[in-house]
């Protein structure tokens, strides 16, 4: 087999486009929830700081949402262009799940996003708040369906293979397949955690530079509360998700642990260089018994090893092993930040502790890294299968599409997405450097409607 | 199962028609962008579609997703067959879609994003027309899989339909601009609509002549015996709508030109559907051979029956919130540093 055949190119292309895409929903799912909170606080208290916060973060939301829309559209067609066999065979199961996502989530988000962004002067404050809520609900519904579809590929259930195609016997079993509830909770929490880090990071940047202080303090405080709750919750959910994976996809867990032999008293490797060819690790630094303790809650617990299956049925161990460590390491760093924030708050120095603010700034993008690392664990860990244990990745690609076509589009995606990402970061940093638009009392006295939005909608001249 | 297959085909048809009409006018606005009288007109034009473009484009995901839902086999044949035009369309839609946000944030690079909006809209429209032509002319299938090459889609016919759709979207865009603007911009849109309307009619005539020549089955569908009589309302209505279109532009109606253009699209679409029936992919894949298993079709249809009416209701509501003339101020086009 040539080193760069159609299969590996199609995998690289999908890995790249889906990784690029997930960055944006990760932020918009969480940010939509924070926007609901900001607007609710404003409507209830009438304190304009909440409105200023809303108006600032909704700009970042809009910019990010647009990126999510265009990169998501690509995926819905890429299934067919590069993975036509997968589409034909699993379409009867996964098609309706994706169809329900479009019907119940995408239309809802798109329908009310316009009102959320431009509707300030067109609808009343209550209706505007409703639009924000519906967009936020839409993002969660979207996560529900797409994670159900992804989870079905990890832990297929409720369908049987008839005449070369999957046929669904039980839709509830398909939707609520064994890994779905944990994956949904783990990913939704990842979104909110990532968003909390972005909010505390940008707010800490303002606090350090002494600008936009009033707004930054509010957001920093809210973000730190969120971190304190979400970081430990995410560690618990991750642990439960891992135990679920151990039950249903033991080889994925074996790769995460870098564990080759099925054994009791299995150690946890803090560091290792897994070598798939020799079926062993180099340079292990390990905690004895720890893997058995984590996975089986007993030192004598027997933990599955990669050698249980043939080499061609093992996932690529190195990527899974290291992605897992990046994710877990960052997760504990987020917990540390949350605890530090709580300690500083208790001491009454939440807005003054320089080290805390610096760590918050440094961790601004870290949630995205952790989320991507988590997806690498679960997706690369599923290999060599598209439908775990049932359909191999090599049998999923489009038979007639040439490696040259996939290579060409892959290069184009790299260039175009690279440029887009640069533009996104440029305009994002422009928004951040400019900061929230202040809302002075004078302004609100002169123009009462200014309360309702500095980013006014389409003005009808007749009005 | 045959009835289910036909209803499934109808749902896909409606989703694609909704997409063509709705995203058609905002792609058309993009196609007309560089020809607008001035930057203020461009601001007004982009503002007129900014609150609704995202919803419009969602119908394209429903069309693609719907094909995977109801006809996974057809989806898995069509996309590899149309690999290059589909990818080109997706890249174009990316450039066009990000323009809404980036152009709004841009200061010195507005002109760059104007270009991105134009080329993105133009290429997306052209490729959608090419896809239409490539589908109508037929796809080579063996053993439920695509069996042709990477460039089978590229023919004079598909280029003709590509040009036709560009002009058609341009017409939808121009008549939308007539409806949403006033003064100089509206005057310019009137002139554009007349030119594009002429182009659309020529393209429709050319496609109507060429389509029956593609396959004897299509000619038979239209011209054999009583069919000629039953199907005669389609060309006659098209003619009546064409007259209405030009009359309404000349008499300075504001909404009627847009509605007539939509009518022309619906009739053109109906004509193509009649030529293709009962194939989901001509010449040899009828809907009942490609339809998904019963359990999937029923489940999805329940979803469509329950959710789609709600989608339509709040889409109409979202449009009604932004009724009336668009303005160059506010919205996306408001450059805060200028």
Image: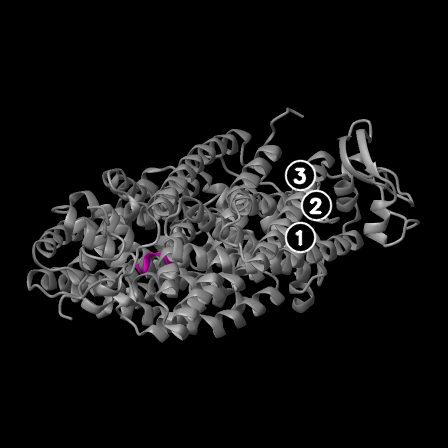
Q: Chain of mark 2?
A: A
Q: Nearer the viewer, residue A406 or A238?
A: A238
Q: Which residue is labeled 1 in the image?
A: A153
The residues colored magenta run: B51-55
Q: Earlier in the sequence, mark 3 or mark 2?
A: 2
SS for callout 2? loop
From this viewpoint, which residue is outermost toward the top? A2
Crowdedness near tag 1: few (<14), some (14–19) or many (≥20) residues, C-alpha within 10 Å: many
Residue B138: x and y in percent read 43, 46
Crowdedness near tag 2: few (<14), some (14–19) or many (≥20) residues, C-alpha within 10 Å: many
SS for callout 3? helix
Residue under disc 1 on the same chain as residue under disc 3: yes
Residue B328: x and y in percent read 18, 55
Up the image or down, A13 lies above or below A95; here it is above
SS for callout 1? helix
Q: Are marks 1 and 2 in contact (CB under 8 Å)?
A: yes
Q: Which residue is labeled 2 in the image?
A: A382
- Residue A217 magenta: no
Q: Nearer the viewer, residue A146 or A236?
A: A236
Q: Chain of mark 1?
A: A
Q: Tell me the distance, in whole angstroms, between the alpha carbons under discs 3 and 2.
A: 13 Å
Residue B212: x and y in percent read 33, 50
Q: Main secondary structure of the magenta part?
A: helix
Q: Residue at x 46, y 40 (%)?
A: B83
> Splitting the image into 4 quarters, where does residue B228 fall?
bottom left
Q: Nearer the viewer, residue B200 or A444?
A: A444
Q: Residue at x 10, y 51 (%)?
A: B188
Q: Are marks 1 and 3 in contact (CB under 8 Å)?
A: no
């Amino acid at each position: 087999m040539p080193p760069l055949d159609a299969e590996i190119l199609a995998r690289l292309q999908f890995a790249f486009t889906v990784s690029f895409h997930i960055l944006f929903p990760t932020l918009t799912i969480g940010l939509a929830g924070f926007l609901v909170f900001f607007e609710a606080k404003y409507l209830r208290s009438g304190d304009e700081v909440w409105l200023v916060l809303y108006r600032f973060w909704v700009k970042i939301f809009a910019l990010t949402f647009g990126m999510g829309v265009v990169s998501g559209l690509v995926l819905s067609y890429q299934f067919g262009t590069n993975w036509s066999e997968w589409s034909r065979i699993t379409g009867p199961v996964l098609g309706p799940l994706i169809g329900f996502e479009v019907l119940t989530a995408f239309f809802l988000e798109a329908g009310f996003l316009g009102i959320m962004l431009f509707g300030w002067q067109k609808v009343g404050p209550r209706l505007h708040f409703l639009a924000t809520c519906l967009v936020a609900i839409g993002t969660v519904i979207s996560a529900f369906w797409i994670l159900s579809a992804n989870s079905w590929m990890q832990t297929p259930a409720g369908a049987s293979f008839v005449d070369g195609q999957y046929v669904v016997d039980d839709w509830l079993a398909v939707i609520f397949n064994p890994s779905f509830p944990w994956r949904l909770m783990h990913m939704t929490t990842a979104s909110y955690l990532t968003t909390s880090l972005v909010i505390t990071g940008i707010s800490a940047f303002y606090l350090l530079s002494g600008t936009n202080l009033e707004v930054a303090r509010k957001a920093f405080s809210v973000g730190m509360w969120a971190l304190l709750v979400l970081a430990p919750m995410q560690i618990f959910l991750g642990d439960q998700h891992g135990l679920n994976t151990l039950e249903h996809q033991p080889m994925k867990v074996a790769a995460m642990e870098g564990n080759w032999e099925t054994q009791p008293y299995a150690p946890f490797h803090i560091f290792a260089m897994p070598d798939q060819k020799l079926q062993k690790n180099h340079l292990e630094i390990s905690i004895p018994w720890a893997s058995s303790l984590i996975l089986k809650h007993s030192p004598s617990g027997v933990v599955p090893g990669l050698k249980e299956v043939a080499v061609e049925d093992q996932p690529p161990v190195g990527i899974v092993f290291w992605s897992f460590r990046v994710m877990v390491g960052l997760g504990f760093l987020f917990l540390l930040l949350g605890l530090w924030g709580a300690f500083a708050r208790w001491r009454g120095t939440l807005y003054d502790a320089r080290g805390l603010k610096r760590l918050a700034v440094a961790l601004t993008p870290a949630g995205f890294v952790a989320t991507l690392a988590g997806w690498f664990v679960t997706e690369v860990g599923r290999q060599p299968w598209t439908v775990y244990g049932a359909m191999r990745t090599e049998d999923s690609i489009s038979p007639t599409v040439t490696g040259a076509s996939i290579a060409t589009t892959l290069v184009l995606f790299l260039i175009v997405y690279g440029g887009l990402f640069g533009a996104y970061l440029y305009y994002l940093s422009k928004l951040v450097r400019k900061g929230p638009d202040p809302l002075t009392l004078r302004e609100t006295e002169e123009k009462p409607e200014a309360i309702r939005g500095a980013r006014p909608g389409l003005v009808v001249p007749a009005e | 199962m045959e009835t289910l297959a036909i209803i499934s085909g109808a749902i896909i048809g409606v989703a694609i028609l909704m997409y063509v009409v709705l995203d058609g006018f905002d792609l058309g606005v993009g196609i007309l962008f560089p020809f607008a009288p001035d930057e203020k007109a461009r601001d007004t034009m982009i503002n007129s579609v900014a609150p609704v473009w995202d919803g419009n484009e969602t119908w394209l995901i429903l069309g693609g997703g719907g094909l995977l839902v109801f006809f996974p086999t057809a989806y898995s044949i069509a996309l590899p067959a149309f690999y290059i035009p589909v990818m080109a369309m997706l890249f174009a839609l990316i450039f066009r879609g990000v323009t809404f946000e980036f152009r709004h944030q841009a200061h010195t690079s507005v002109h760059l994003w104007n270009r991105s909006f134009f080329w993105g809209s133009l290429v997306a429209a052209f490729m959608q027309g090419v896809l239409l032509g490539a589908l109508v002319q037929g796809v080579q299938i063996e053993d439920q899989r695509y069996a042709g090459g990477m460039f089978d889609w590229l023919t004079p016919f598909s280029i003709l339909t590509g040009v036709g759709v560009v002009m058609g979207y341009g017409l939808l865009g121009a008549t939308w601009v007539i409806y949403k603007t006033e003064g100089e911009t509206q005057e310019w849109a009137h002139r554009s609509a007349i030119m594009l309307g002429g182009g659309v009619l020529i393209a429709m005539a050319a496609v109507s002549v060429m389509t029956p020549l593609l396959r004897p089955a299509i000619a038979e569908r239209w011209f054999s015996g009583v069919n000629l009589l039953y199907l005669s309302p389609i060309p006659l209505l098209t003619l009546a709508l064409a007259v209405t279109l030009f009359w309404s532009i000349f008499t300075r109606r504001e909404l009627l030109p847009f509605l007539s253009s939509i009518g022309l699209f619906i009739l053109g679409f109906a004509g193509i559907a009649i030529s293709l029936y009962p194939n989901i992919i001509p010449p040899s894949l009828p809907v009942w051979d490609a339809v998904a298993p019963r359990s999937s079709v029923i489940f999805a249809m329940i979803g469509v029956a329950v959710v789609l009416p709600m989608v339509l209701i709040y889409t109409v509501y979202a449009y009604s919130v932004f009724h009336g003339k668009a303005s160059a101020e506010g919205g996306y086009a408001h450059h805060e540093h200028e």
